[in-house]
Image (spheres, rainbow, N blue to C red):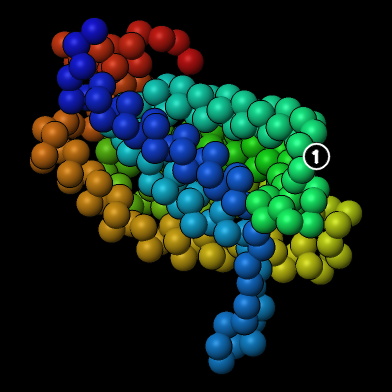
Amino acid sequence: MKLDRRIGLFAVLAAVFVTCLVVGDLIGVKVIGGTVPGLGWSWATTVGMTAFPITFLLTDLLNEFYGKRAARFVTWVGFGMALLTFGLITVASAIPFADFTRGPDWTGTTEAAFNNVFGGGQRMLVASISAYLCSNLVDISVFHLLKRLTQDRMLWLRATGSTLVSQLIDTLVVTAVAWYGIRSASDIATMMSSAYVLKIFIAVGMTPLIYAGHAVVERLLHMRPVQLDAAGEPVEHAGDPVRALDAARPD
């Protein structure tokens, strides 16, 4: 296989995407929050929000330069890796700690600490995996729809619009599954509203990064975004195996 720029970039984008997804799931057990100065508005969300905005950006770049089928492929790969992570954590949690780690002189990770972080994080992983799959597939479809309706114009609209729709779904699903029965209805509502408002600000704030990433790929790597025909299907380009694959496969 010839490892040209296009395939190399695809591999890098996919690898960073999966890394951010899995790490975001693992650190999502840490809840952060505070109060907006001067407004008295309380907010709460998980620290996984430090990683997930990167996946928004990468999903849009994959959709823009490789098409919706390639973006869906990476989405399913990420889903598989998240399931693998869940399985490995489950197995690791079931394996007993060595007896000497229970001694008073042990300064490493204790059984209680490990189980508190990773055992408690399994519900968060299930919530995040479920929300991720639903929201990312919606994001890809909305991005593609807006790209077709605007005839490849207004990058900001399809990037921001798809994120706002998909992250509404993500926020509702992940918060409900992760915290139902654990926190009060008012706490859950606060988490949902504050997380989504935060995602709105992130989506708008990342618009310049979308354009910057777009410019880097086009000008430095000399790659053009996927072009759509009148029916909204990607136009095949000679010598481009990724686009050829995308154009050849039915939905």
Residue 195 position in % (x across, y down): 61, 62
Location of mark 1 (residue): 99
Q: Identify the residue at image location x=29%, y=54%.
A: 209
As drawn, 205 above or below 140: below
**Which residue is more in the foreground, 33 or 193?**
33
Specify the quadrant of the image occupied by residue 32: bottom right
**Visible in this render: residue 148?**
no
**Horizontal arrangement in the rendering, residue 91 relative to residue 242 (left or right):** right
**Which residue is more in the foreground, 173 or 96?**
96
Specify the quadrant of the image occupied by residue 61: top left
The quadrant of the rendering that contains the N terminus is: top left
Taking the view exactly as shown, the residue that stands out farthest to the bottom is 38
Name which residue type carries label 1.
Asp
Q: Identify the residue at image location x=56%, y=54%.
A: 48
Residue 173 position in % (x across, y down): 70, 46
As drawn, 197 above or below 212: below
**Horizontal arrangement in the rendering, residue 33 relative to residue 231 (left or right):** right
